[in-house]
Image: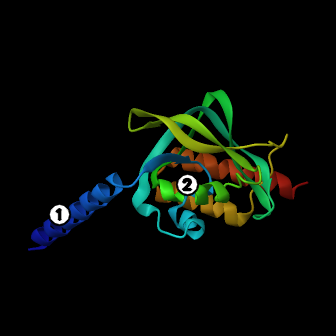
Amino acid sequence: MGDRTWVVESETWVNSEKNLHKSQLHEPMFYYFAYGSCMCPVDLKRTMGESTHQYVMGAATLKGYRLGFYRYSASRKCGVLDVVKDSQSNVVGVLYQLPWRLSESLDKREDVPSGGYRRQSVDIDFQGKIYKKVRTYVVVNKLLQEIAPNDWYFNVVLRGAITCKLPEEYCWGLFNHMHGLQSSQLSE
């Protein structure tokens, strides 16, 4: 009987997923690659005004870039993530398929109107398939040196990485990078 219950629950979940995708087909969508705090669907919901969990496709890779904390966010009072071209590196993040109606809110969150970040189209590797012209955001005026994140930003980034199942080794690398920046800032 336990197996039968599991099958029914599984079929219900699959059917609701199919219904979700059918509704998405009728609404204009865009692909978005998140590598910082936007990897966390809970934090994204905070500023978007609606749940974004259902739009998560999963862990994906931006080749030829590396992460760095090259922007100071006055609202977060700390360094925040950016991507910088680097042919020897890759950035792992979260690929979303978002409804177009969230585009303006996402631009505001990324401080596009004030010149904090700008949209950039990139190619993303997701499950062995290359997605072309995926939206991401890059810092407009990059700092010369990285600035450490505060504990809140640190935790949101890691929560997003773990929630969206980025590779464990990558999560540890992200943790060590952020922790190293914080430690060096404390010793100054």
For disc 2, the marked residue is 103
Quarter of the figure that contains the C terminus: bottom right
Residue 20 percent across, percent down from the top left? 31, 60
Which structural element holds mark 1? helix
**What kind of residue is marked 2?**
Ser
Left or right of 16? Residue 153 is: right
Q: Which mark is residue 11?
A: 1
Which structural element holds mark 2? helix
Q: Residue at x 68, y 62 (%)?
A: 153
Q: Measured along the vertical axis of the image, is residue 75 above or below residue 85? A: below
Res. 70 image quadrant = top right
- The type of colouring in the image is rainbow
Task: Rate crowding at label 1 as few (under 14), some (14 to 19) or many (20 or more) other CA atoms within 10 Å.
Answer: few
**N-terminal of the two: label 2 or label 1?**
1
Q: Do residues under tags 2 and 1 come within 8 Å of each other at their CB atoms?
A: no
Res. 19 image quadrant = bottom left
Q: Which mark is residue 143?
A: none
Q: Measured along the vertical axis of the image, is residue 12 above or below residue 128? A: below
Q: CA–CA distance between discs 2 and 1?
A: 33 Å
Q: Measured along the vertical axis of the image, is residue 68 above or below residue 103? A: above
Res. 5 image quadrant = bottom left
Residue 103 percent across, percent down from the top left? 55, 54
Left or right of 2? Residue 110 is: right
Left or right of 5? Residue 124 is: right
Residue 31 percent across, percent down from the top left? 47, 46
Q: Residue at x 83, y 51 (%)?
A: 184
Quarter of the figure that contains the N terminus: bottom left
Task: Rate crowding at label 2 as few (under 14), some (14 to 19) or many (20 or more) other CA atoms within 10 Å.
Answer: some
